[in-house]
Image (cartoon, coloured by chain):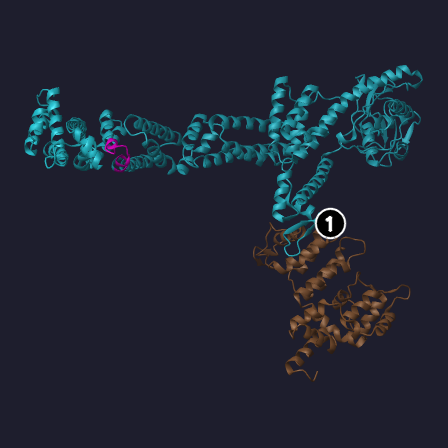
Chain colours: A brown, B cyan
Amino acid sequence: MNKLGRGHRDKVQQFMTITGASEKVALQSLKASDWHLDGAFDVFYSQPHPKSFTDTRHLEEMYNRYKDPYADMIMADGISTLCNDLQVDPQDIVMLVVSWHMKAATMCEFTKQEFVGGLQSLGIDSLDKFRERIPFMRSELKDDQKFKEIYIFAFGWAKEKGQKSLALDTAIGMWQLLFEEKEWPLVDHWCQFLQARHNKAISRDTWSQLLEFARSVDPTLANYDAEGAWPYLIDEFVEYLIENGIIEKGRVV
Amino acid sequence: MTMSQMKTIELEEGWSFMQTGIQKLKKILEGLPEPQFSSEEYMMLYTTIYNMCTQKPPHDYSQQLYDKYKEAFEDYIGSTVLTSLREKHDEFMLRELVKRWANHKVMVRWLSRFFHYLDRYFIARRSLPALNEVGLTCFRESVYEEAKGKAKDAVIALIDQEREGEQIDRALLKNVLGIYVEIGMGQMDFYEKDFEADMLVDSAGYYSRKASNWIVEDSCPDYMLKAEDCLRREKERVAHYLHSSSESKLLERVQNELLVVYSSQLLEKEHSGCRTLLRDDKVDDLSRMYRLFSKIPKGLDPVANMFKQHVTAEGMTLVQQAEEAASNKAENVGGPQEQVFVRKIIELHDKFMAYVTDCFMNHTLFHKALKEAFEVFCNKIVAGCSSAELLASYCDNILKKGGSEKLSDEAIEETLDKVVKLLAYISDKDLFAEFYRKKLSRRLLFDKSANDDHERLILSKLKQQCGGQFTSKMEGMVTDLALAKENHSQFNDYLSGNAFANPGIDLTVTVLTTGFWPSYKSSDLSLPAEMVKCVEVFKEFYQTKTKHRKLTWIYSLGTCNVNGKFDQKTIELILGTYQAAALLLFNASDRLSYSDIKTQLNLADEDVVRLLQSLSCAKYKILIKEPASRTVAETDSFHFNSKFTDRMRRIRIPLPPVDERKKVVEDVDKDRRYAIDASIVRIMKSRKVLGHQQLVMECVEQLGRMFKPDFKAIKKRIEDLITREYLERDKENPNLFKYLA
């Protein structure tokens, strides 16, 4: 480190804070990208993360601490213990980000592979490190691209196994949680509308298109195109907004 | 000849000789007494020119003679022609001009003959304008150029006089205008520039003034009469004295002033415009309107548009009338009101189709307008029924025995033809087909069809218009019934051959092909023992015919004739199978409770209530219900009414009909979902990647022949196909769909 110039040293520091990688990894990545920070991130995130900097033994211990006594996976109880240890509310959206990192298939469950693999890729091998990384994970929600990935991930994660669509109550809960992060002024109307008019499960297509709608269509609906390919549920939502005088062409009442 | 060879002719000498000839010609032209040229004189003149042109230089006077030739004309024009023209005015001036032009042509003819030798060598060699041309050019440059303006004004003034009804000398005008044409020597430029342009402007002005008065004073029909008359007379005018090339230009100007300018004002004239003419059936005026406006570009558009509006309004009035009639007689659903409505629609179509063919000469624009108008009100819901259903009921009423319309065979055929035509305007053809099938099945199964030929006739018409797929099931139904008759006689033969098998009851079984007929509810009715025997016997018989078919018994469609032994007399009761099965229970017990009946028959509550209602609460009370009331409750009990009697020996006890409309609509909706799915998959399979709007458009186009799919319905199907992984959205562009093989 001392051999490096000041600029390079700063970059290594910066890289380590953002990715949580070790100095060695930071150096490798930065050198590989000719000391460009953006390039280094690409290198870092596109490669399977070097496992050398986490201690598998520690991870094994952590996993066993939360493991369900009757199955080889972490279940609801284990997760609530974990949350306790992390001083995070189990309802906190950051747990979704954690699950996303772990590529968890189902809500309230981590298989051993998901848990260990996820922590390894995050570079976490102790509770302290885990706790330190929580604010970073929370900040990931502010990144548009990551938010989209997490949003899409949430559908598969939250739906029941074997079902193609997401139960309405769960969907509404997830939306309220997610759009607290990514503000969308119509979220409450959307949820009310669904309960009043739809009352059925939500398809993956509707789920993913809603984010698109929230992102691209103005809350006053000024740029909404009725001829577009929006799922019919969204079209009906727009009709509902206009019918109930919530929106009047191009302006919020 | 010998003379000339010896002596050269000097220019002055030769020319003075020529002058005498020219003087003589002038005198002749002026009409002064003068003998005609003799051939010697002519020979002498020609020879002189010949000699003067063939002398050796410097005595070759060709060039000088060529110039003199021209001077001769200029001289004559300057001294005589112009002065005489200048003295005269208007019509007289025109006459003079015509005369002078004729004279000039004579002069050119003679002089060019005298000087002919120049044409042959001198002119040809030097490529100079020919003598004839020089002569005409002289006139053009000196006379025509001076007189053309005055002449044009005079001609136009005369034309306007004629337009006002005065007699004019048409031959004179024809001659004058002939000058404008001839002066061009094959080109129309002079005629067009010096006369036609101003004439067109004047004509436009003339008719503009006329039209501005007429449009205020006259009614639309009068105005059109005048306009047509004007156009006819302008056309005649061209034939009489204008050049034929002026016709299209002149008519276009006149049409513009008379029709284009006032088009909307004329068509929308209050109390006499297009709408009024349509309302008052002014067929002649409408024909005239078509003739006039068909000539101007886009002229028919507003007429067709008003026609469409008018037909739509008329149709909507019928819809409204039917609506009101229905609300006045709320209970009478499906009654004659609806029949009246369809009949009126047919009459309306006849009437306006006649307009299209007669007044509007079968123009496509009007066919389209008629179609669009009918599509509007033929797809309205009338008194809770879709027009598809109304049309099907109307057909039923015509085709069934004892329908309310009493028509001759020809009239029936004609009406069926019209009904099928109306169907073209209905977008929910599948709904019509479903209702039609429902009604057809009733006609066929209950022997209510009045005429087999008519049934087949309408099917062939429908097939022609909507395709084989549309009628295949209906045709199957009709065929089934023919086969059933055959089957029945075979069954009778079988019975007579197997005496032990005879169940002791007359039995007729109609075997139908499942797919052709509407779906019926089959139930596990516990048949009375007598009937069970019947079923067994038939099954055995059927086994002998075919091994691989499964019979499903639809008892709900059966009829039974049962003898009721009442105290006073025996009455034959015509009942449904359910009703008969229920009554037969009372052969064994005197009194049965509702639940007894229900368990013994093994039927659902709604069926039990319906049949008990028909036997105990309706017109004929075969059963006595306790406690007596108008509706059947689950706590009621029943016993046989042995006191029952009627003046008839045979009575029919109908089951109250079930409202099938909802089921039909649901069935059609389900079929549509499949149809949309199939269409989307078909399109995507061939296109692989397609934008949302295009997909919807193609889907609508594919399905339009059967029904008009709702955009929302298509969207829902697309989303369903995404869920079922036939399609996916493009990751970048959510408006783009991809086919997943």
Q: Does B273 sit above or below residue A97?
A: above
Residue A107 is one of the magenta-drawn residues: no
Q: Does B255 sit above or below residue A127?
A: above
Name the residue at 88% across, 34% down. Answer: B602
Toward the bottom, the furthest residue is A2
Q: Nearer the viewer, residue B204 or B336?
A: B204
The residue to which callout 1 is attached is B725
Name the residue at 63% across, 24% down. Answer: B416
The magenta segment is B180-193
Name the residue at 66% across, 43% down. Answer: B686
Q: Position of residue B533 (x, y in %)?
A: 91, 24
- Asked where in the image residue A14 lies, by quadrant, the reply is bottom right
Q: Which subunit holds the residue at mark 1?
A: B
Quadrant of the drawing holding the N terminus of chain B: top left
- Asked where in the image residue B628 lies, by quadrant, the reply is top right
Q: Nearer the viewer, residue A171 or B361?
A: B361
Can residue B131 be seen in this snapshot? no
